[in-house]
Amino acid sequence: MRLGFRLSPGGMTRSEIDLYADERELERLRRTVRRELATHPGQEALAREIGVSRIVLRRFLAFSVPRLAHAQKIREWAEDRPPVWVPFGAVLLGTAVRDLPTPERARARQKLARVLADGFARASHPLPAWLEEEASVEGVAAPALH
């Protein structure tokens, strides 16, 4: 992909493009882990299969950025899994909250998603599936915002 046209004064920088690519990869891995957890016996067993601790897995799912060694193990494990579609909006949400402290990331991300969901509701426009997922709490749809 040619990115030169985006790299100009006032445009995106290489570091911003790299940040987006990194965040997209983390989103893909999180979605792969979540999909596996939906059919897997539990976090402990899945963490063992991946080669990380349950705490590392739980924190990763809560939007922490794993250490390089842990990220590599998750990446290698995910290579044998079917590909996952990563919505652009989910990557943008992840990028928007990335600089927050880890404990605040999930809350801020969900609040941003709920604000977007509220905008869709006010416009009487159907909610995209990715946004419904982002705005939900542990898989339960969030109440309509007014």
Image (spheres, grey):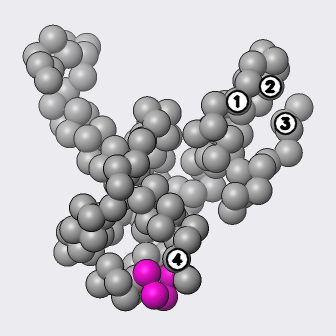
In space, the residues marked 1 and 4 are separated at their CA atoms by 28 Å
- Give the label on residue 121, or none: 2
136 in the magenta segment: no
Mark 4 surroundings within 10 Å by alpha-carbon count, few (fewer than 14), some (14 through 19), many (20 or more): few
142 left or right, relative to 31: right
Q: SS class of the residue under badge 4?
A: loop
Q: Earlier in the sequence, mark 4 or mark 2?
A: 4
- Give the label on residue 127, or none: 1
- Give the label on residue 40, or none: 4
Mark 1 surroundings within 10 Å by alpha-carbon count, few (fewer than 14), some (14 through 19), many (20 or more): some
Residue matched to label 3: 145
Specify the amino acid type for callout 4: His
Q: Earlier in the sequence, mark 3 or mark 2?
A: 2
Q: Earlier in the sequence, mark 3 or mark 4?
A: 4
In space, the residues marked 3 and 4 are separated at their CA atoms by 33 Å
Res 112 seen here? no
Q: Which residues are magenta?
A: 42-46
**Are the two marked residues, 3 and 4, in contact with CB atoms closer than 8 angstroms?**
no
Which residue does the image show at 43% across and 76% down from the upper left? 57
Specify the amino acid type for callout 3: Leu
